[in-house]
Amino acid sequence: MYIRPFDPWKSKLCTCPFKYTLNVYTGCDHACVYCYITSYIPNAFKVRTKKALLPKLEGELRKFDKRFIIALSYSSDPYPTVERKLGITRKVLQLFKRYDVRCLLLTKSDVFERDIDVLSELKCAVGITVTTIDETKARLLEPNAPLPKARIRALKKAEEAGIPVYARIDPIIPFYTWEDFEETLDALDFVSHITVSTLKLRPDSKKRMFAKFPELMGKLWPLYERGERIGGYYYLPRELRFKILREAEEKILGRGITFGSCREGYRSFPSCDGSHLVPR
Ligand code: SF4
């Protein structure tokens, strides 16, 4: 089965409503330093297509319970570099339209702009992840993803086309992306909902972070050593995490945008993942 119930990496802190997920591709070449899919997908930064995805998906969609949402995609990005040429995600969205499927899209690319014509005919909410508006930092953190300003420009176009839009500022990295939080929010002030999440490290992402940001990790890691270990992830100390989340919440709500947090044990309203924006 290509459509699967969303399994939040067994996190006991996940507050997502029940939903399904579909990974159009295996792997993701945006190659974010902090990415966690490398801990469970072999060769995760190499993108592979899936065998007979479209005919098999069509068979699954015929029987799919339309009350539920399908999220694209939580263990990859629906718009890796190759999607510009292959257009498989576009064909998936066309199938969603044919079968009247409710969809929650999340990407770190601007290529979805090409598909606004299809997305605007779907019961769909579109979101982008932006860790920081600072291009130099974004390039270091997400070397192959389109730059944040391009993602935001595309999202603005989706919003102008009447599509409900949201954003994730995830991960928030103390001493780094947290420094630009206000400017990042300024650039996203047209969205309806923002979900935030602090940096959670796995042994492999910790290794990549140390290799790329030795000075930053020299300051950060002692904090993580004092923090919690939840479901195989290193978390910041709860007190510091909640301080960051409270400040983020205040700044987001202050702009008339609703607030969500992801796998933090902290509140979210009306949803943690933006699923409340998907039309029924
Ligand atoms: S976009 Fe997401 S799945 Fe792709 S490398 Fe970055 S964090 Fe991993």
Image: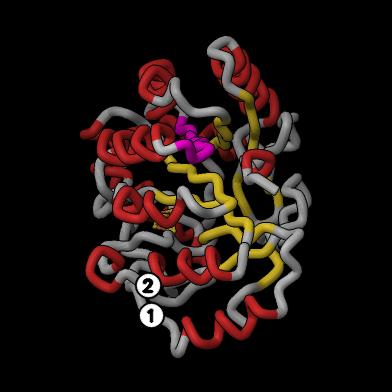
Q: Is residue 42 visible?
A: yes
User: Label 1: few (<14), some or many (≥20) within 10 Å?
Assistant: some
- Residue 240 image offset from top left, x and y in percent: 62, 24
Instruction: Say whether residue 30 is left or right of residue 127.
Output: left
Main secondary structure found in the magenta portion: strand
Q: Is residue 32 visible?
A: no
- Image point (69%, 30%), residue name: 238
Instruction: Say whether residue 133 is left or right of residue 68.
Output: left
Q: Earlier in the sequence, mark 1 or mark 2?
A: 1
Image: 279 above or below 29: above
For residue 28: magenta?
Answer: no
Q: Which residue is mark 1?
A: 49
Whether label 2 lies within 8 Å of ligand 1 gets the answer no
Instruction: Say whether residue 64 is left or right of residue 55.
Output: right
Q: Which residue is mark 2?
A: 88
Q: Quadrant of residue 161?
A: top left
Residue range corresponding to the magenta coloring? 162-173
Instruction: Give the number of callouts.
Output: 2
- Image point (42%, 30%), residue name: 219
- Residue 145 image offset from top left, x and y in percent: 28, 51
Whether label 1 lies within 8 Å of ligand 1 gets the answer no
Image: 129 above or below 106: above
Image: 46 above or below 274: below
Which residue is more in the foreground, 226 or 206? 206
Q: Quadrant of residue 29?
A: bottom left
Q: Are marks 1 and 2 in contact (CB under 8 Å)?
A: yes
- Image point (26%, 47%), residue name: 146
